[in-house]
Image: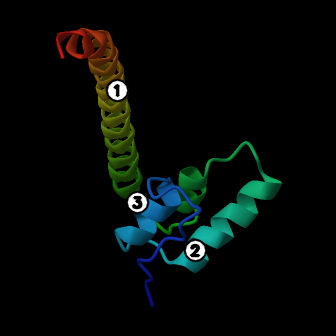
Amino acid sequence: MFKKRIPEDQDPHSIGNLLIEGRHCTPEQIREAIEYQKEHRDVLMGVYLVRAGMISDDILSAMILKQEAAKRQKGAVIKFAKYAARKAREVNAHLDRQLPLAEELK
């Protein structure tokens, strides 16, 4: 009944995917919410699911918190990757400066 697999082209931290992964909604319920949202762009998916009685306010709040935590974690990973790349460039530049000196010593 519940599928936990998320297509690779979708954000694994979207509210819909988190609800499916947590077994709070079926993929069919999420598709229904998406279809509703296409016609009612001012209604967020989570609000629709709560109003339709598919999930509770508490579940929606928990999924929003989980989504925000994932975004913060992703942001930290990106910051670290940028830091590591910058440090690697600095080390490479240092080595490039040192290489001519090493050649002269031969």
Where is residue 41 shown, x and y percent of the image?
A: 76, 46
- Tell me the amino acid under the disc marked 2: Gln
Where is residue 66 shown, x and y percent of the image?
A: 33, 48
Q: Earlier in the sequence, mark 1 or mark 2?
A: 2
C-alpha distance separating marks 3 and 1: 35 Å
Q: Residue at coordinates 36% horizontally, 39% vertically from top-left? A: 74
Relative height, residue 93 to residue 9 (above, below): above
- Tell me the amino acid under the disc marked 1: Lys
Relative height, residue 105 to residue 41 (above, below): above
Query: Quick one: SS at disc 1?
Result: helix
Tell which of 101 and 23 is nearer to you: 101
- Tell me the amino acid under the disc marked 3: Ser
C-alpha distance separating marks 1 and 2: 36 Å
Q: Quadrant of residue 78?
A: top left
Which residue lies most toward the right here?
39
Dot 3, how many residues are within 10 Å of its Cα: few (below 14), some (14-19), or many (20+)? some
Query: Quick one: SS at disc 2?
Result: helix
Q: Quadrant of the C terminus?
A: top left
Q: Nearer the viewer, mark 2 or mark 3?
A: 2
Q: Earlier in the sequence, mark 2 or mark 3?
A: 2
62 on left or right of 36: left
Which residue carries the number 3 mark? 56
Q: Are marks 1 and 2 in contact (CB under 8 Å)?
A: no
The dot on residue 29 is: 2
The dot on residue 94 is: none
Q: Residue at coordinates 24% horizontally, 9% vertically from top-left? A: 104
Q: Are marks 2 and 3 in contact (CB under 8 Å)?
A: no
Query: Quick one: SS at disc 3?
Result: loop
The dot on residue 79 is: 1
Dot 1, how many residues are within 10 Å of its Cα: few (below 14), some (14-19), or many (20+)? few
